[in-house]
Amino acid sequence: LIVVLLGLLWFISYRIWTAEDSVFESKLVMVRYSYLLENLKHKGNDARMYNLVFIARRVSVCFVYLFMYKWPGIQLQITLLFNLFALIYTGQVAPFNTR
């Protein structure tokens, strides 16, 4: 089950990564996925991946909490590292900076 979920996440991220800019500007995409793409930069590949990176981080934190319950110190350290990574990623990519 985990392999299937990771494979699906990889497939979706690959499709978004390789899509052209015109795909994100089409009317159908904006109507169907406006809640995900509202004020989100889609010109750079890193900014396109913001939602998937956010979801992958949340899923990985859940797996850490589920499977590493015997080691709370390591859980805390991994959670802090994930949060630090997300902070650095958001600062570098600035996905919602539309100026």
Image (cartoon, rainbow, N blue to C red):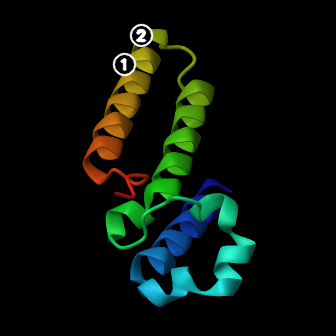
Residue type at the position of mark 1: Gln
Residue drawn at (66%, 85%), measured in percent from left and top?
27
Do residues under tags 1 and 2 come within 8 Å of each other at their CB atoms? Answer: yes
| Mark 1 neighbour density, 10 Å: few (under 14) some (14–19) many (20 or more) | few
Horizontal and vertical percent position of residue 7: 55, 67
Mark 1–mark 2 distance (CA, rounded to whole Å): 6 Å
The quadrant the C terminus occupies is bottom left
* Residue indicated by mark 2: 73
* Residue 49 coordinates in the image, percent (x, y): 43, 62
In this rendering, the answer to whether 45 lies above or below 96 is: below
Residue position for label 1:
77
User: How many other residues sit within 10 Å of disc 2, few (<14), some (14-19) or many (≥20)?
Assistant: few
User: Which quadrant: the N terminus?
Assistant: bottom right
Residue at 53 percent across and 23 percent down: it is 68
**Which of these two is toward me, 7 or 30?**
30
State the mark number for residue 40. Answer: none
Q: Residue at x 49, y 11 (%)?
A: 72
Q: Residue 10: give x, y in percent of width and height.
A: 50, 68
Q: In which quarter of the image is residue 32?
A: bottom right
Left or right: residue 81 compared with residue 56: left
Residue at position x 43%, y 16% in the image? 76
